[in-house]
Each structure stands twice: as C-alpha cells, then as structure tokens.
Image (spheres, rainbow, N blue to C red):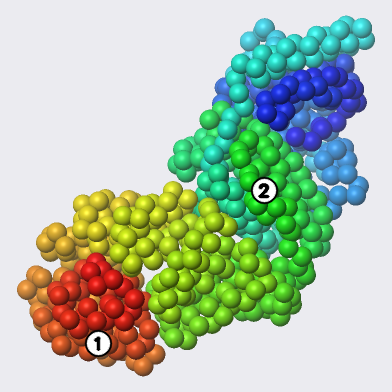
Amino acid sequence: MNDLGGSIPTAKALKRGAGGKLVWIEVQVSVQEDHQVRGRLRFGVFEADLRAGELRKTGLRVRLQEQPFQVLAMLLEHPGELVTREELQKRLWPADTFVDFDHGLNKAINKLREALGDSAESPRFVETVARRGYRFLADVKGAEAAAPIPETPRPIASPRPRLRAPAWRGSVLGLLAVMAALATWRFLSTSRPSPVIRSLAVLPLESLSSDASQDYFADGMTDELISDLGQISALRVISRTSVMAYKHARKPLPQIARELNVDAVVEGTVLRSGDQVRITAQLIDAATDTHLWSQSYEGELRDALALQSKVARAIAEQIRINVNPKEQAALRHVEVVKPEAYESYLKGRYFWNKRTAEGLKVALAYFNQAIEEDPGYAPAQSGLADTYALLADWEYGVMTPKEALPKAKAAAIKALELDGTLGEAHTSLAFCLDVFDWDLEAAEKEFRRAIELSPSYATAHQWYASHLLVVGRTGEALAEIRKAQSLDPLSLIISADLADFLVIAHAYDESIRESRKAIELDAGFALAHDQLGQAYLEKHMIDDAIAELQKAAQLSAGSPTIMANLARAYVASGKKDEAEKLLSALRKSSNPGNSHASEIAMVYVALGERDQAMRWLEKGYEERFNPSVLLRPGFDPLRSDPRFQDLLRRTGLPAGAR
C-alpha cells in the first residue's frame, strides 16, 4: 500500500528474506497531527488497519481497492472535519499524475460507500458537502481502546475540537507502539512460515476509465498477466475463461478461491488515459484473506508490456515458488511493439474471446490490422492463427477446413519464425498438423513444446488430450483433459470434451455426471445436452436421449452434428421415418464447401446402410475432415469393416482406434 500521508520517520525492523533468513530493514512510521501512531481504527462495526490497507466488518475482511481505501484513510484521519476535493486530489493523484480526477474520485467514493453499506442520501459514514468535499460522520476510536464501540455510528453535527496529548506522551506512545508491533511481527514470522502459493487466479482487472468501450484494454491486460504467470511450471494459473466469470462479481475472495481451488488471487485496476497507462495490482492469500503485496506501475502505452512484465515478476518473487532460469528469462523478456499495433491486438483478442461467429470475424480484421501496423509482432500472427482455427470449427461454420486451416497453419509458422517461445503459436500449429495435415508425429512434438513453454495454457492441454485420444492413448487423454479442466474449471467446452472422451471410453455414467455439471453452469449450453443425450443413447435410455438431443438441437439452431445424433436416437426408438426426414434435411443442406459428410455417414450407419455410409466417409476424407470423428460411437458398427480400417490407416489413426 502506498503511503497515505503525514511525516515519515524511519525505524529498524526485522524481515524474513530469501531462504527464511532474518534481515534488518528500515520501516516507515507515519504519525498523525496529534502524534498518535497510525494503526487500527474502529467506527461502528468496522475496523480499518491503515498500515495493512485492510477494512474489516465484525472481523471479516471487506474487499476495498487501493484508492477507495486511501480516501477512507484520509477521512478517518480527520473525523468530523471537511476534507476538500482538492486535498483528496493532492493526496491521491499528485500534480504529475494523468487521471480524470472527478471521475476517479466519484468512483472511489461510490466504492467506499458500497463497502460500508452507506448511501449519499442518508449517510451514516461519508457525507457529501456539495461542491466542496466530504466529511466522516461516525465516531472514530483506536482499535486498542477498551470502551465498546456502538453498533450504529452517531452523526457529528459539526467539527469538534480535539484535545492534544503532550508531545512527549505522543512520542513515548509511538515508540511503544512500534516496539510492540516489531515484537509481534518477530513472533509471528518465526512461529508461522509465509504461505507457499502453488496456484492462483488473476481476477479480471477493473478498468477505471469512464469509457466502457475501453474494457478491452483491461481485459487484455488480464490476459497478458495470466499468460506471463502461466509460464511458471511450478504454478497453476487459472485460465481466462474461468476468471472472467467473476468480472463485476461481488463474491468474497475466499469463496472465489474455493470455487477455483487456488491458494491466492491477484486483483487490481487499469487506467488508460491517452497514451498513458497505470496498472495497480495486489496479491491476496486466500486462506487468511490477507494482503501479501500491492504495487502500482505507470508508464506510456508503448511501455504497457514492460509494466505487465514488472507486475508478473513482482508476483513471482512474492509467491515463494521455484522459478527456473528459463522461466526467469521469459518473465524478463519484453516484446517491443508499436502502440497502435498492440491496441489492435488487444481488440482482436477481446472479440476472439467472445467465441461467436461475428466476434471471430471482427477479431480477424483487428489481427490483420495489427500485422499491417507492426509486421514483426508475433502475438498478432498467433492470434490470426487461433482465429482461423476456430473459423473452421463446426460450431461456427464460417469457413471450411480446407479454406481456413492452411491459413491458420501459415500464420502459426510465421508467429514462430518471429518468436519461437510463444506457447499459443505452437498450440495452433499442432492443431493444424493434427486435424488437417494428419501429421500426428509432428503434432505431438508441437503440443509438447507448447506445454513446456506455457504449462498453464488450458487450450494446449485440451487439444493435446484430443490428440492422445486419436492415437489410442485413452488413459493419457483423460488425464490431460482433466489437467485442462483444473486450469479452466468453468470452461463449458472443456467439460463437454471430457464428457465426450468418457463416452468414447465407455464410461457412460461418469460422462452423464460431467454433462450434468456443465448444464448446472449453463442450462443453455447445447453441447452439454448433446453429450448427455449420446451417453443416454449408449446406455439404451432412449426416451431420455431423445429429450436431451431435441433440446440440444433447439439450442444449437439445428447443428448438423446434433441432428445426426438425434436421427440415431430416432432409429433406436423405432422412429425410422423421423430419422430419414432428418437425413434428407442434412443432404439438402449439403454443399461443396460443407457437405456434412461425416454426419450423413453416421445416420446411414444407424439405418444399416453401410455402403452409403462408407461413400460419404470417403467424401469427408477428400474434404480433410477432422479424423477424430471416426472415434464416435455412431461408427462402432463399421469398425470390423476392412474399408473402415483402411480409412483409419490413411488418416494415421491406429487400426483399433475407438
């Protein structure tokens, strides 16, 4: 926490340094006007620790960011007195600080009132003095005071004169307080070791900009920090998909940590003002809900990556975990990029993360723009590769695999030519080698390199799990997809993939449980209903299967893959006419760019027409379908067919793949 004001004498104190060794350091002791050492103050049911920068209510910590807490601290130093907006500006935002002061202060006051459960209309704590400033209304006492604190604060009608203690008494009390604090610290530091953090979540950094369209910048900074920390192999860092679920959430930090199963959380703010950037971050121990570290960094937009790197390195130093030399070098490495290209890149990632067809189209434009602005910026090429990879996915159906995946591969190769340390680019290249080139051996090497460089990148583990499943290493595939889930526990697509893998492994009951978990997270997620329906179908729970697959078809607006599964269920229930209607619709919607070949083949298998099924599978082979479709349960009746075994061989899959 930055200094909150007052004169700053120094004293000697002990601190546990590297390797647990105690060393002497200088500490700053702020002294108020009445010579009392600034420490813990009580008002109503609240207690503010001015040294630690913490606010508690009936003993429980209340989340309050740095600037709102500094406003509170200044008000507590002058209870009952008017603290002008100019005084607050001078304390919080010095003259050389770039900020929209009025907006920043208003936001800080609103957050403070929210934390205190106060209101501007009927204030119990913070009163607004129109056009002048603010006044703290409640009685304020030292936390050490023996007298009980009333539950409801008593408003102060006007400033009251305060009795001054003799100077010598204030000095003695101050010295005693410092000695007592040092003795307590020494006892705690020797009797209780600092927490070792092996997992953390970077919560969405909050944008302090008054312009909502600037959200992409704060989200981008969050992504970069996750990516930087995710390079540390000994640390599990939760992926973006899961942490973004807590954007604007008001849950207590310990609860968030429990839900994400992490030891610590990072939270903070980002302020973008023209070409200037300010990042404030704090590290909080989840078990004790206490601050471990807090710092602010300022610089120009062109220095944004350097600021982000400083934050990551500072956190790495605080968590007391092993960071090998390669990882240390990676954390020190700062990409040089033109500011306009970096901004376009962040906008591209913002829209890419929306995971919608329209969002991907916008992302494609921004990544191309970033490349035009700075052709040497490797992450923009990596983003382009990721976008093309998803544009070819059946869920979005924007481009065919033949059209999109060669472009994805070219962009990934270009990214790696510019920077071979990008784990995301190795992942994208591996994906293309796997699902389009069918070069499984080369894909294996790229996946392993990707995970080595970015061990907390959930997508790398997810796609590598699919690769392992394709090559017949089912046990390893399940372990890898569960690793991906531990890194991104709220990811719906990873949950759906796990349920899919479990069906392929004949673990139907476990697959059902996984799909139900995903539906609890989002009842409108079509793939979870599809996977649940497939598991019911394999267990011969036909009515339940049809109900789930009909729901999935409705939610997906008629996805060809889901319609094919529904047709299979109709055949199993004896409704052959209904199945043939769906087959006819699939054939009518088939076109040279997207023939739905594997889906149509699957329905023919269910209808017992094997020759037609093989004809359509050969069509899919010519279109370079994703070979993993051949693992689906719908193709089980073909597994002994020599033609099907030959198809497996030509796509690189083992003959007994299932």
Which image quarter is the N terminus in? Answer: top right
* Residue in view at x 27 percent, y 87 percent: 618
Q: Amino acid at mark 1?
A: Trp
Residue 221 visible in rendering: yes
In the structure shown, which secondary structural element does the residue marked by tag 2 occupy? Answer: helix
Which image quarter is the C terminus in? Answer: bottom left
Residue designated by label 2:
325
Q: Is residue 169 above or below residue 505?
A: above
Point out the tag, 2 or 1, that comes first from the N-terminus. 2
Position in image of residue 138 (x %, y %): 71, 23
Q: Is residue 222 above or below residue 618?
A: above
Which circle marks residue 616 in the picture?
A: 1
* Residue in view at x 65 percent, y 74 percent: 417
In the structure shown, which secondary structural element does the residue marked by tag 1 occupy? Answer: helix
Q: Amino acid at mark 2?
A: Pro
State how far apart marks 2 and 1 are (Cα). Answer: 53 Å
Front position in the image: 138 or 650: 650
Front position in the image: 308 or 52: 308
How crowded pointer 2 is (Cα within 10 Å; few <14, some 14-19, many 20+) is rated as few
Residue furthest bottom as drawn: 592
The total of numbered circles placed on residues is 2
